[in-house]
Structures are given as structure tokens and as C-alpha cells.
């Protein structure tokens, strides 16, 4: 059985689970741990009442009643990341975490009890439409999102290619909402790209911790080691997370073997697990800085926190999202459940969830500058254009600051 992490996030087709930080796949036990002081006769009374008295008996779907009861059970916990997935939901979830799905390409989460865009994925309909980190989703096709779970929102937003969805958005510092009509498409999630910049600096843009990101990073690292590169900028901006074991694997390139990557906090009754670096540690000699912003979440926060706590690597940019809870995926007889079981701590023991990581060097952007910046970066990297480095850095204050900081490191 394997622990992984998402961020939570389901990727909206969201990646909207996105930003969650941890998945454990297991088979649910069949035995019941029913408390002795509970009387389940109330449930069956309600069931019988519907069966006997509901006016449209031909509309009764007993299987959906069971699914609905389980969903009500999870909703009573008031945890947006603990959810029941019926067989179709589970199929979509597994498809999305594999790195390709149909939707609009955003990751969503809950912030201050409001459904919020964590980040749009680069090159997707959501990014092209102008959605950005921090946008509050007020309605989905005229359905109010108050008290709506992340998974319910994801199911409403995702859909077949060439169909449309309307998101009513309340943007930060604004009082009026705006409707975004977005056409869904096939979303292919890139893992990373890298390029050699001036002054022999390797710039690595890590988009997401997908299943292939570990092997993709291995290949990029081999190329960097064979190149004239002398320093590294690791860009985790708008990286909403993915698999924990992938973040752990990538951390192993930058940390000594057995260095702590993350600590699992379960609670007073159970002992958590410590995740450590496995090597190969070959990028340790390279002076490194990390770019973060409010769209950096879950696995991004774990990797950034691990490199800062262990090596003092500076984080540059903006405060991260703050998604550090762990979900276990328990397979049921039909469908599955995603259950929050723990929270992550950085190696220094700092809680990530609902707090985030503060940068060592803060570079705040105006909303206009932020929109312009990420549109430019996505075009430059995804289309592999040969934009001049000076133009590239001039458009990116975070990157400019990273270059300044790197120059001071010998």
C-alpha cells in the first residue's frame, strides 16, 4: 500500500483535490466498529418512511440513497477534504491524478470557508480565461457554492471537451462579481521544464508532482549535471501539489540521504511517520533558491519547507497557500472514501495547514503585474519560445530577485 499526496487538491478539471497532501490507498475493513450507545433504528425508520410515503416511488433509486447517506456522513464532519466517491467519482479521480482529464484546468480548495481558486494550470482554459490564485468561486452555473465541498464543486466544473461552464468570481479587493464562461478541454498536465539561463543558472519550472514528475526530474537533473550550470532556481509558483513520494524523491537530489523531508502529525493517540530523503544528493553543491507564491500548495510546500529547514535555501516571492493535510483513499465495496487522517509538519516542526510558508525574501506583485507575469511565463515555457533572458527576467520581479540573491551566494 502506497502513500501519495495530492494537492488537494481533485485537479479541477479541476485538480480540485487538490491541494491535498497525501493519499494512502487501502481496502476498507468490513467489520463494524459501531458505538454501543447508538441506535441505528432512526436510519431505517427514515428509509422506510421514504419507501412507504414518498409520492414519486418510480424515482426512488435505492443505490443512490445509500450513496447519499454515506455522503451525508462525511459532510457532517465539516471537512471539505473528507469525502465519499461513488464508482464514477472514483473513476474520474483516478483519471485526474494520472495527469490527463477533461475540464478547465484549475485547482480549488477551501479558504476561510469559501471555495477558492488555488491556481490555474499553465496553458489551460482556466489560465487563458484569466482565472487566478485567490479568486473566490461564488457560483458554478448559477449554483451557489456556500457550504459546497471541494469534490462537489469539482464534479460541477469538470465535464466533456467543448462544453461550457460559467464561474461567478469575486476577486480580491473587489466588491462586484464577474462571470467567466469557460470552454472545457482535454487537460494534459506537464510535470516540469528547465532551461539554462545566463550566468550558467539552471532554471527549473516544476508544474506539478505528477506520477511522471520523479522520472522527469531525474532526466532533467542528469542534463543539468552534464551542462555548464553552476546554480539553480527551482520555480514552484502555482504548483498546487501532487504525490508525496514524488516530492520526497525530488528532495533527495538536494538533501543528504536520510535528511528529514516531512513529518506526519496524526494526533496524541498515534505515532506519526517521518519521511526522509533517499538520495542521490547530487545537486547539493549547486547554490539554490526557490520561487513560491500563493498558488504553491501541498507537495510544493513540503519540498520548499524541507529544503529551507535542512539547508537554509531561501524562499523568494509570496506566502504559500497553506495546504498540509493528509488524505487516505480507502477502497470500498463500491467506490471509495478520501479521509483526512493527519497533517504535515516541516522538518523543523512547523505546521503548514492553513498557515503556509512565509518567504525569506518577499516580492509582492500587483494584480495587474501578476496576471501579465504568469501569462508571459506560461507562453515562454510551454511553447518553448526562445525569448531573450533579459526580456524574460524583466517581466518577472520574483525571478529578478532570485538572480540577485544567487549572485551573493558563492
Image: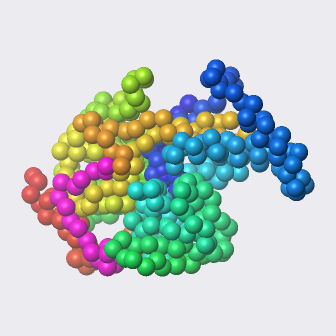
Q: Which residues are magenta?
A: 355-375
> Relative to residue 237, is residue 19 drawn left or right?
right
Q: Quadrant of residue 342?
A: top left
- Residue 352: in magenta span: no
Q: Is residue 298 visible?
A: yes
Instruction: Identify the residue at horizontal 57%, vertical 36% (top origin).
Output: 25
- Please identify the quadrant where the N terminus is shown: top right
In the image shown, does 363 or 337 lie closer to the viewer? 337
Q: Tell how many labels.
A: 0
Q: Residue furthest right?
A: 58
**How far across and down, in percent of the image, does residue 233 sit?**
26, 58
Instruction: Identify the residue at horizontal 38%, vertical 25% (top origin).
Output: 268
Task: Classify 274 as above or below 123.
Answer: above
- Residue 359: in magenta span: yes
In the image shown, does 383 or 109 lie closer to the viewer? 109
**How far across and down, in percent of the image, does residue 182 sit?**
57, 76
In the image shown, does 292 or 337 lie closer to the viewer? 337
Instruction: Identify the residue at horizontal 9%, vertical 57% (top origin).
Output: 408
Instruction: Identify the residue at horizontal 61%, vertical 72% (top origin).
Output: 141
Amino acid at each position: 500500500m502506497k502513500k501519495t499526496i495530492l494537492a488537494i487538491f481533485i485537479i479541477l478539471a479541476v485538480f480540485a483535490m487538490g491541494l491535498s497532501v497525501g493519499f494512502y490507498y487501502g481496502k476498507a475493513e468490513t467489520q463494524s466498529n459501531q458505538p454501543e450507545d447508538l441506535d441505528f433504528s432512526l436510519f431505517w425508520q427514515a428509509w422506510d418512511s421514504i419507501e412507504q410515503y414518498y409520492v414519486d416511488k418510480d424515482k426512488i433509486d435505492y443505490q443512490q440513497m445509500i450513496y447519499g447517506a454515506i455522503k451525508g456522513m462525511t459532510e457532517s464532519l465539516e471537512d471539505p477534504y473528507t469525502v465519499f466517491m461513488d464508482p464514477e467519482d472514483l473513476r474520474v479521480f483516478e483519471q485526474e491524478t494520472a495527469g490527463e482529464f477533461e475540464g478547465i484546468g484549475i485547482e480549488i480548495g477551501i479558504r476561510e470557508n469559501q471555495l477558492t481558486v488555488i491556481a490555474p494550470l499553465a496553458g489551460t482554459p482556466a489560465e487563458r480565461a484569466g482565472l487566478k490564485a485567490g479568486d473566490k468561486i461564488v457560483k458554478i452555473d448559477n449554483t451557489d457554492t456556500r457550504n459546497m465541498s471541494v469534490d462537489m464543486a469539482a464534479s460541477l466544473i469538470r465535464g466533456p471537451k467543448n462544453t461550457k461552464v460559467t464561474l461567478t468570481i469575486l476577486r480580491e479587493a473587489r466588491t462586484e462579481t464577474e462571470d467567466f464562461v469557460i470552454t472545457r478541454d482535454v487537460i494534459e498536465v506537464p510535470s516540469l521544464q528547465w532551461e539554462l539561463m545566463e550566468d550558467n543558472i539552471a532554471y527549473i519550472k516544476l508544474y506539478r508532482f505528477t506520477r511522471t514528475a520523479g522520472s522527469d526530474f531525474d532526466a532533467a537533473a542528469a542534463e543539468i549535471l552534464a551542462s555548464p550550470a553552476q546554480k539553480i532556481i527551482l520555480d514552484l509558483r502555482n504548483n498546487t501539489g501532487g504525490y508525496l513520494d514524488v516530492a520526497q524523491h525530488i528532495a533527495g537530489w538536494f538533501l543528504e540521504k536520510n535528511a528529514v523531508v516531512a513529518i506526519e502529525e496524526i494526533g496524541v493517540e498515534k505515532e506519526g511517520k517521518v519521511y526522509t530523503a533517499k538520495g542521490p544528493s547530487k545537486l547539493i553543491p549547486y547554490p539554490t533558491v526557490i520561487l513560491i507564491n500563493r498558488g504553491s500548495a501541498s507537495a510544493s510546500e513540503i519540498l520548499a519547507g524541507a529544503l529551507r529547514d535542512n539547508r537554509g535555501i531561501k524562499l523568494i516571492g509570496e506566502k504559500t497557500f497553506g495546504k498540509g493535510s493528509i488524505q487516505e483513499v480507502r477502497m470500498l465495496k463500491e467506490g471509495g472514501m478520501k479521509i483526512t487522517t493527519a497533517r504535515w509538519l516541516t522538518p523543523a516542526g512547523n505546521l503548514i495547514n492553513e498557515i503556509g510558508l512565509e518567504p525569506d525574501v518577499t516580492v509582492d506583485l500587483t494584480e495587474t503585474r501578476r496576471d501579465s507575469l504568469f501569462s508571459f511565463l506560461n507562453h515562454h515555457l510551454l511553447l518553448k519560445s526562445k525569448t531573450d533572458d533579459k526580456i524574460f527576467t524583466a517581466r518577472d520581479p520574483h525571478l529578478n530577485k532570485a538572480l540577485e540573491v544567487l549572485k551573493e551566494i558563492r
